[in-house]
Image (cartoon, coloured by chain):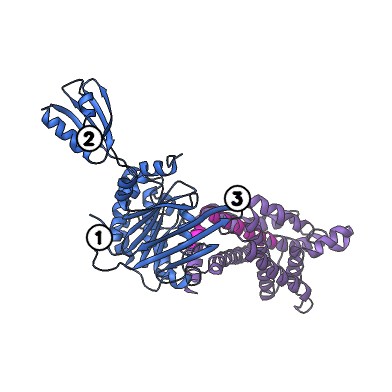
Chain colours: A purple, B blue
């Protein structure tokens, strides 16, 4: 436990020392959020359609972007650490393997929370429409979704051959999932095969869960999505446990 | 000069016992069949070319890798089953390991300190390793020698009984290498057992009390460096320049001399055994030669390696 806290704090400090990583993780999503909001509402009083875009679509899009970014960053860190022999070195200490990897998950969650918190603050001041949501419900939905996406990141990190390909391969796997997630086009309006594909992909359930939490849906009616994401985490951790490479 | 093994009065405890170790990666057999023992307080070296199986052997002994078969005991523990008990009693420096680019020296030492039940004073350790001034430097800003010294510090932070050092000086310049050698001697002088691997024969010769020569996953010879040289390479050479030409026929009559090459008044005399050197000196004295240059050419571990394997270590 002491090792986990120590390593998490250390990795947090190390991450903050990389200016580009910090900008991409915290500053960029906030800027994107405010920019999207402003550009949709540039022509006077927003219409009902614009209001819906601003009140629902943009916040969820940016939330998802932050979660996926965290996973891509996790994939990059893990593969760089593996390639540099850092994982190997840490593993030769009394630190248990789950602690070494768990510290990175905690760091990613911390920065996800930071960027979403910053978005909420920036939103109050600069966002063109007021949004109402249940922060607890929304946070829990984001936490579960992010954990599921991070666990997919572990599987990706296990299979990417070198650090150079980590980010591109991770993006090529995760971003297309957003396309069939029902975020842009509802699953019901998609061609059947695409809708079926979307139905089995974890990000679809993440989108649905976050959207539901955002709209104030009760957790009871959300259980299929919760179940799907919990299953995703369990399956991905089981796969990682078998195929994860430390060197 | 060196060697805890020279005292015959008490049996030296065995710290590491390896018997018929074998390890394969898929169809590639890294270690075929290796057996040896390491005694308390010695510097023991596994030497051989890259890919000989040195690192794999060391990592199996240190509990970092699981062997496919064979038995290994270290400090009376099984490195596979007792890894967590073992970790607080050994220190390791791994080949080509890195730390986080932006971690600071003191942060690394502090993290490592927090992981072990018993540690030495980190400030004193950094002082001893000449890293005090680099306390706040990031890992990526350190020179190769400084990085290796930091890794040595991390390997020593828990005051281990056995220290594993894998290719410690590879890639360092001669000056940094010498500093590291002093350091390793210092570790042994503090009563610790050192287990190292190297492909540098000079390093093995300078540091190790005993060496095991490994090739193609097998141990082909084991002993003190000087004993191995005496056993496998009895050739001696004497090179000298004098004021007289045409001494070759007389030099060839010295007992043990096998060949003489003359270039004007300069001679290269080769033969077997230490008697050759004495014979040449005696000859020079008897002939009252004026000598402007005189040196002996002694075989080294490198020659032993060449003789045993039929190729040089860098081939």
Q: Is residue A55 above or below residue B218?
A: below
B26 or B101: nearer the viewer = B26
Task: Determine whether, in the image, residue A60 is placed left or right of residue B305.
Answer: right
> Are discs 1 and 3 less than 8 Å apart at CB?
no
Residue ID for mark 3: A162
Separation of residues labelled 2 and 1 (CA atoms): 33 Å
Q: Which subunit holds the residue at mark 2?
A: B
A42 or B184: nearer the viewer = B184
Residue ID for mark 1: B6
Query: Of label 2 and label 1, which has the lower sequence position?
Result: 1
Q: Is residue A179 above or below residue B50?
A: below
Q: Secondary structure at mark 2?
A: loop
Q: Are marks 2 and 1 on the same chain?
A: yes
Q: Position of residue A178 (x, y in %)?
A: 75, 58
Which residue is painted at 46% across and 56% down in the image?
B99
Q: Quadrant of the N terminus of chain B?
A: bottom left
């Amino acid at each position: 436990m002491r090792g986990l806290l120590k390593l998490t704090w250390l990795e947090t400090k190390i991450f903050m020392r990389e200016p580009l990583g910090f900008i991409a993780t915290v500053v960029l999503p906030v800027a994107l959020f405010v920019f999207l909001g402003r550009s949709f509402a540039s022509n006077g009083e927003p219409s009902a359609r614009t209001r819906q875009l601003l009140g629902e679509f943009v916040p969820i899009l940016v939330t998802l972007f932050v979660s996926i970014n965290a996973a891509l960053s996790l994939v990059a860190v893990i593969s760089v650490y593996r390639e540099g022999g850092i994982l190997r070195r840490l593993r030769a200490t009394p630190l248990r393997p789950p602690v070494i990897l768990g510290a990175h998950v905690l760091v990613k969650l911390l920065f996800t929370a930071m960027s979403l918190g910053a978005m909420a603050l920036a939103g109050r001041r600069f966002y063109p429409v007021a949004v109402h949501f249940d922060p607890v419900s929304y946070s829990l939905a984001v936490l579960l979704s992010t954990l599921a996406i991070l666990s997919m990141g572990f599987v990706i990190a296990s299979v990417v051959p070198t650090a150079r390909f980590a980010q591109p391969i991770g993006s090529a796997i995760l971003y297309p999932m957003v396309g069939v997630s029902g975020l842009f086009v509802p699953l019901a309006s998609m061609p059947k095969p695409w809708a079926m594909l979307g139905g089995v992909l974890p990000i679809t359930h993440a989108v649905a869960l976050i959207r539901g939490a955002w709209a104030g849906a009760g957790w009871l009616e959300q259980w299929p999505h919760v179940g799907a994401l919990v299953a995703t985490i369990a399956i991905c951790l089981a796969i990682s446990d078998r195929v994860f490479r430390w060197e | 000069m060196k060697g805890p093994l020279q005292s015959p009065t008490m049996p030296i405890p065995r710290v590491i016992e390896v018997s018929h170790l074998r390890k394969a990666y898929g169809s590639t057999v890294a270690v075929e069949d290796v057996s040896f023992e390491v005694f308390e307080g010695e510097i023991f070296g596994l030497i051989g070319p890259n890919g000989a199986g040195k690192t794999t052997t060391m990592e199996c002994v240190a509990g970092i890798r699981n062997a496919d078969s064979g038995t290994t005991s270290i400090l009376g523990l099984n490195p596979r089953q007792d890894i967590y008990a073992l970790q607080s009693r050994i220190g390791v420096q791994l080949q080509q390991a890195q730390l986080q680019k932006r971690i600071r020296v003191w942060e690394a030492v502090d993290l490592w300190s927090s992981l072990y039940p018993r540690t030495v004073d980190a400030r004193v350790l950094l002082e001893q390793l000449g890293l005090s001034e680099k306390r706040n430097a990031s890992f990526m800003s350190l020179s190769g020698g400084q990085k290796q010294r930091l890794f040595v510090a991390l390997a020593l932070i828990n005051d281990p009984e056995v220290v594993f050092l894998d290719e410690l000086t590879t890639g360092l310049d001669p000056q940094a290498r010498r500093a590291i050698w002093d350091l390793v001697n210092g570790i042994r002088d503090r009563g610790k057992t050192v287990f190292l691997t190297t492909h540098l024969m000079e390093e093995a010769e300078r540091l190790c009390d005993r060496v095991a020569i490994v090739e193609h996953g097998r141990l082909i010879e084991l002993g003190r460096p000087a004993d191995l040289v005496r056993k496998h390479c009895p050739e001696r050479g004497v090179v000298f320049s004098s004021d007289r030409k045409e001494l070759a026929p007389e030099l060839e009559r010295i007992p043990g001399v096998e060949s003489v090459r003359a270039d004007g008044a300069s001679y290269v005399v080769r033969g077997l055994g230490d008697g050759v050197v004495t014979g040449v000196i005696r000859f020079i004295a008897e002939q009252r030669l004026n000598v402007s240059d005189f040196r002996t050419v002694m075989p080294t571990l490198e020659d032993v390696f060449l003789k045993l394997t039929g190729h040089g270590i860098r081939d």
